[in-house]
Structure formats: C-alpha cells, structure tokens
Image (tube, grey):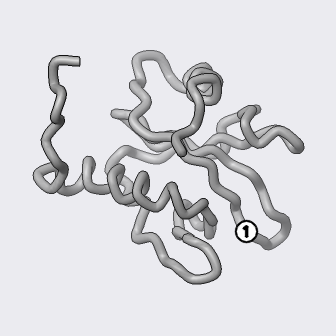
C-alpha cells in the first residue's frame, strides 16, 4: 500500500526546493542500539532518510541523512522480513515495499527495464 498523500506532504516539507518525490517507503533501522523508525524518500535528485516522531511513524521530524540519487537501495534480502543494507544500516521494510525499492533502483540504474506508462497523457 503506498503511503498516503498526507505523509508525502509531510515529507515534501522536509526536502529541498524543487525536489520531486518519486517514491516513499517506511523502514525500521534494526539494532544496535535500538530500532529507529524512518521514512525513505526517493526524489529526482536525492535519497533522503527522515527520522520520525517516537510514537508517530507517519510524522517526520528531521533529516537523518541524504544520499545522491545514484545510490543503490537494493538488493532486497528476504528472510524473516525484507531487508536492505543502506547507509551503513540494516533497514527492514514491509513486504509490499520490496517492489518500490526495486522500481527506484531500476529507474536510476536501468530505466530501459521499466514498463512504458500506459496513460502518458494523465
């Protein structure tokens, strides 16, 4: 399930001017020392990792880190739950966001592999 428009708007407020959000997915940075809730925002210029409020995983409260757009997110490793190693952390994501990670990487590294937009005029 994609994140809501409300969450995307909250993330947009934390980004630089002119950045266009392509993908957003929630992730958990696994221990040590503690599990941290994050939102990963992929834009046309960067990948920005946002920290969230302690009891509100849908409300970003700061920029954790920013990486160049040509930074690879995957591969997604499946085990107990889908995980990626990114930015020196192990991030666990929900099953439904594995496809988002693959699409973000394909867009940056092999755009010819993406299907054509069936409704380009919308």
In front of the other: 33 or 6: 6
> In this figure, which residue is indicated by the disc labeled 1?
30
Q: Quadrant of residue 74?
A: bottom left
Q: Looking at this rendering, what residue extends furthest in the right direction?
A: 55
Q: Residue at x 60, y 60 (%)?
A: 94
Residue at position x 43%, y 30% in the image: 21
- When asked about the image quadrant of residue 116, the answer is top left
Q: Quadrant of the C terminus?
A: top left
Whether residue 100 sits left or right of residue 36 in the image: it is left
Quarter of the figure with the N terminus: top right
- Place of residue 111 in the rendered image (x, y in percent of width and height, measured from the top left): 17, 49
| Residue depicted at 54% across the width and 63% down the height | 95
Q: Compared to 91, does 109 lie above or below?
A: above
Residue 49 in the image: state x and y as whole percent: 59, 45
Name the residue nearer the viewer: 23 or 65: 23
Q: Quadrant of residue 120?
A: top left
Is label 1 in a helix, a strand or a loop?
Answer: loop
Q: Tell whether 45 sits left or right of 86.
A: left
């Amino acid at each position: 399930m994609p994140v809501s428009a409300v969450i995307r708007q909250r993330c947009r407020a934390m980004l630089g001017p002119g950045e266009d959000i392509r993908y957003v997915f929630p992730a958990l940075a696994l221990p040590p020392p503690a599990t941290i809730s994050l939102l990963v925002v992929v834009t046309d210029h960067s990948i920005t990792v946002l920290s969230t409020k302690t009891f509100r995983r849908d409300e970003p409260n700061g920029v954790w880190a920013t990486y160049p757009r040509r930074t690879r997110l995957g591969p997604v490793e499946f085990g107990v739950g889908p995980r990626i190693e990114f930015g020196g952390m192990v991030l666990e994501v929900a099953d439904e966001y594995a496809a988002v990670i693959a699409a973000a990487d394909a867009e940056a590294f092999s755009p010819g592999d993406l299907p054509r937009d069936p409704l380009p005029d919308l």
